Amino acid sequence: MLDLTSTLPVIDLSALNHPSQRSLTLDQIQSACKELGFFQVVNHGIPLSIMNDALAAATEFFNLSLEEKMPLLSDNVHNPVRYGTSLNHASDKVHYWRDFIKHYSHPISDWIHLWPSNPPSYKDKMGNYAEAVQVLQKQLMEVILETLGLNFGNLHNEIGEGNQLMAINCYPACPEPDLTLGMPPHSDYGTLTILHQSGPGLQLQDNNKNWLSVPFIEGAFIVQLGDQIEVMSNGRYKSVVHQVTLSAENKRLSIASLHSLPLNKKIGPAPELVDEQHPASYNEFSFRDFLDYISSNNIEDRRFIDSIKKSA
Ligand code: OGA
Ligand code: NI
């Protein structure tokens, strides 16, 4: 069988600083965004020690007794900090093999006091990581908008002041890995998700609905386009559908930093990308609209983005 996974794009971000390599790198990013809504990045400027420290803090957090994590337990998707299991424990028809902690993270001074105070190093290590990833997010948004021919200047403030939700996931080893998933197929709601993982398990769907396993590259970040980019690009770029598979032997941790424009900011197709040949294909939505949708709908029945597509 053809090994499609070995062709998944890996982008060397340092090449953007070399005038002779910049335009080729922009082309690589553009193709990855068009074809998959996914790529990995290396030479991104974030030290491995910051990445490893954040995973270590997450490991310690999940190792705490259930009693210590219980005070953060919540099914309310509007809570800025919450611990949970599965996808949405209250409404899932099947239970997924996952524990998670989610917290708002930007600007950090607004939220950090709400984060777990155990392990004692959590705030420091996860805080350093969150701030570093927020900087990377701005750089990536700038180049992705450039590849769409959009003016970053217009969006600069909103991208800088946008929402950063960190979803820190723990997928314990599973005795029957073929019978369930860590997370069911979904796309992320925001602009970009920047993901750091401790090992393999993530899969994404290509245009032909094949599931491709994402190769594990130490020190790389996974970048996934979310629904806000698909809408902004008027469908030129696609948000990537992904899922998490399990292993019988290994526990897996991941830290997904989900970025979006500010909570109440409505996003529609960019006017520059709408014309007679390309009529606006989506209604506007905000991150808050997405949260309201998932409070009362099961995304396994219908993806959120399908609810805002204009019927032709
Ligand atoms: C998510 C997600 C993937 C992973 O948190 O939205 O898709 O590998 N996580 O944990
Ligand atoms: Ni996701």
Image (spheres, rainbow, N blue to C red):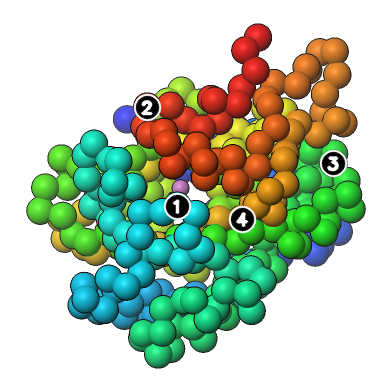
Across and down, in percent, residue 76 comes to 41, 54
Disc 2, SS: loop
Mark number, residue 77: 1
Regarding residue 62, the answer to whether it shows in the image is no
Residue 109 image position (x, y, % from top left):
64, 79
**Residue at the top extreme, as displayed:** 312
- Disc 2 target residue: 301
Label 1 with label 2: CB-CB less than 8 Å: no
- Return the residue nearer the eye: 309 or 218: 309
Q: Quadrant of the N terminus?
A: top left
User: Which residue in the protein does label 3 denote?
Assistant: 150
Q: Nearer the viewer, mark 1 or mark 2?
A: 1
Which of labels 3 and 1 is toward the front? Answer: 1
Q: Residue at x 28, y 56 (%)?
A: 85
Give the structural element (helix, strand or loop) at label 1. loop
Closer to the chain start, of discs 1 and 2, is 1
Q: Is residue 270 left or right of residue 179?
A: right
| Image location (x, y in percent) of residue 143 | 77, 51
Q: CA distance from mark 4 to mark 2?
A: 24 Å
Contact, mark 3 vs mark 4 (Cβ under 8 Å): no
